[in-house]
Image: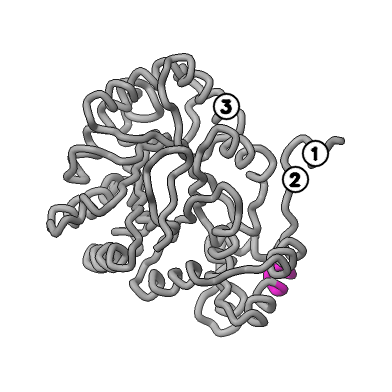
Amino acid sequence: MDYRNLGRSGLSVSPLCLGTMNFGWKCEEAEAHAIMDLALECGISFFDTADIYYWGEHRGKTEEIIGRWFAGGGGRRERTVLATKVYEPMGDGPNQSRLSALHIRRALDASLRRLKTDYIDLYQFHHIDRTTPWDEIWQAIDIAVRQGKILYVGSSNFAGWHIATAQASANRLGLPGLVSEQSIYNLITRLPELEVLPSARHHGLGIISWSPLQGGLLGGALAQERSGIRRLEGRAAETLARHRSQIEAYEAFAAEMGVPPAVLALSWLLHQPGITAPIIGPRTREQLTSALGALDTKLDAGALAQLDLIFPGHKPAPEEYAW
């Protein structure tokens, strides 16, 4: 396994990150535990979750599933780089969401209890909070770091200027600031190339890309549709309709290369500068095993150029739209 540093930090993480959003919701606890066991066995030690996962009245349950797995012993916690998130509402009260110092303190302690651990390796802001000043956010984080509850801090769903503002505030306070940004990024959604990726690279943040298959559209959606295995609905179906011709060309190119479409999409991300790890969200052990193929799939300049023809990307701003 070719481990990578997370951004400018000294933290080594696996080049694929195990996403746990499906645990408990679309994946039963026993299978979730088996997936995590297999991930560690295969060298995937970077696990991502969030306090809100399992959603609605079940929020927090995914962290509990992971906590019970840690409690099984065998060095599981020590071998895992654990990332979770804070921001989303964990109750109906006015101070049970966002990034106030009060909510960060309460949410962090609650995540630690659910996860059955005394520290979080990477604590991520799940969204930008436009109502809380950065001085307050960083003060709360600094206290948690000094208490030994947090080691590193990352962002998620930030714009490029949000990253810059966060780092400027942290620098002024003499704090390390962010080491990572978790952003949607894949062959279909390439808007982060305008400003998010350049800002992250400039500030030394590693990019953790979520939805690397664009909700399954890059995982052989048309082939599955034709065979009756899966039929997309709602927003996914609308996105498929907009990009059908591109996805047809993409699946044909994957077949020409002899690579499963999902593996090709993950491999493309691993070839992009600044990307530390795409997040894979398997519901079964078979899906996890299949995703591992991306680590051994090398794309030459011709293959990368062909993918850019199918799914055109962006130059960094302002060159994308100005001289």
Image quadrant holding the C terminus, namely top right
Q: Are marks 2 and 3 in contact (CB under 8 Å)?
A: no
Q: Residue at x 18, y 38 (%)?
A: 118
- Front-most of residues 11 and 207: 11
Q: Residue at x 72, y 53 (%)?
A: 313
Would residue 105 be visible to someone looking at this image?
yes
Label 2, label 3: how far apart the Cα atoms are: 19 Å
Q: Mark 2 vs mark 3: which is more N-terminal? A: 3
Residue range (magenta): 244-249
Image coordinates for residue 30, horizontal then vertical, percent: 22, 67
Disc assigned to residue 164: 3
Image quadrant holding the N terminus, namely bottom left
Q: Dot 3: within a 10 Å radius of its alpha carbon, few (fewer than 14), some, or many (20 or more) residues?
A: some
Disc assigned to residue 315: 2
Image coordinates for residue 78, horizontal then vertical, percent: 21, 50
Q: Is residue 167 left or right of residue 58?
A: right
- Front-most of residues 192 and 199: 199
The kind of residue on which mark 3 rests is Ala
What residue is pinned by disc 1? Answer: 319
| Helix, strand or loop under label 3 | helix
Q: Is residue 125 left or right of residue 235?
A: left
- Front-most of residues 247 and 170: 170
Label 2, label 1: how far apart the Cα atoms are: 6 Å
Q: Residue at x 68, y 69 (%)?
A: 247
Image coordinates for residue 158, horizontal then vertical, percent: 54, 35
